[in-house]
Each structure stands twice: as structure tokens, then as C-alpha cells.
Image (cartoon, rainbow, N blue to C red):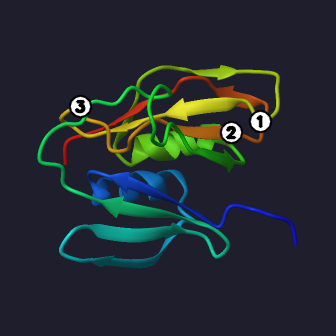
Amino acid sequence: MGSYVEHANITVNNLKSTIHFLQSAMPDFKVRGEGRNQHYGWCHLGTDTSYIALQEVVIDKAVERIPYRQLGTNHIGFVVDDVTTVSERLNSKGFTQWNSIKAIQAEFVPIFWMAMASNGSSLNTSPMQWKAATTTCCNDIKFKEERE
């Protein structure tokens, strides 16, 4: 058996919205475990072989962070079979596309989506990076969560 990433742990400020975004994009991601203690809530979300450990904390004041210039998660890469289908599914689940899909003649070209809360703050510390396994790909796509 080769090496692979079994899980990664990410701290988020809205567990419910982050789960909604990830399951909207990847319906095969299931909750493998979840709980809450006096300090934070958590959820293991993924497949039988790998998952994302999400940890929700409440911060009493905003923390300024410059992505790619300070410690912390900058992005997470996912592979999907058809990025257009994922884009359509996210739109149908209440996420708004901020720019257009471009056809690129390449394999595994990175694309970026960022889930944003309705108040404009990021649900995650940084964009999620997706890699399309088809030649139709997106570049710099962002989604904004609609008000519930």
C-alpha cells in the first residue's frame, strides 16, 4: 500500500456552513463522527479512506492573517471528475458563482473556490483548491453563500 493523506485538521469559524459547502460540492462526503466539548465543536467529514477533520472555534476578536505569508492553511486540493457538474451543484445549493468557467487544454489544472459567509467573512482560512480531472476546467472561481 502506498502512502496517502488519511486526514487533515482545519479550524473553521462556522462548522455547519463549512459542512454544507463541502457536501454540496462532494455529496459522497459523509459525516464519520462529530461532537462538541466546552472549547469547540468538531466533525470528521469525508469518505471511507480519508476525511477532513473540521474544528469550530469562536474567536472573541478578528485575527489578521496574510495567506501564503504567515503560518496556517492556505488551500486544500481536491480532485473531481467534472468541475462543471460541481459548479452547477454548488449553484443549485445556494452558492453564487463570481466569475466564469474557462476551457483549458490541460489535465489537473488547479481551480479555486472560496466559501464566504453572508457577512463577507471567510468560512475557511483560505480558498479550497480543486483539480479537475477533465480538460474543461475553471480558473479562480469563487462562490458566496446566500443568506438563509
Q: Earlier in the sequence, mark 3 or mark 2?
A: 3
Task: Say whether marks 3 and 1 touch (CB < 8 Å).
Answer: no
> Image quadrant of residue 46?
bottom right
Q: Which disc, if any, is residue 108?
A: 1
Q: Residue 120 shows which numbered tag?
A: 3
Dot 1 crowding, Cα within 10 Å, few <14, some 14–19, many 20+: some
Residue type at mark 2: give it: Lys
The front one of 28 and 44 is 44
Amino acid type indicated by mark 1:
Phe
Spot occupied by residue 11 in the image (x, y as percentages of width and height): 37, 54
Q: CA distance from mark 1 to mark 2?
A: 5 Å
Q: Position of residue 63 (x, y in %)?
A: 24, 36
Residue 125 as seen in the image, left or right of residue 87: left
At 60% across and 43% down in the image, what residue appears? 85
Left or right of residue 98: residue 131: right
Residue 121 lies, with reference to residue 26, above or below; the image says above
Specify the quadrant that holds the N terminus: bottom right
Q: Contact, CB < 8 Å: mark 1 with mark 2?
A: yes
Q: CA distance from mark 3 to mark 1?
A: 30 Å
User: Left or right: where does residue 82 sit relative to residue 133?
Assistant: left
Read off the residue under disc 2.
131
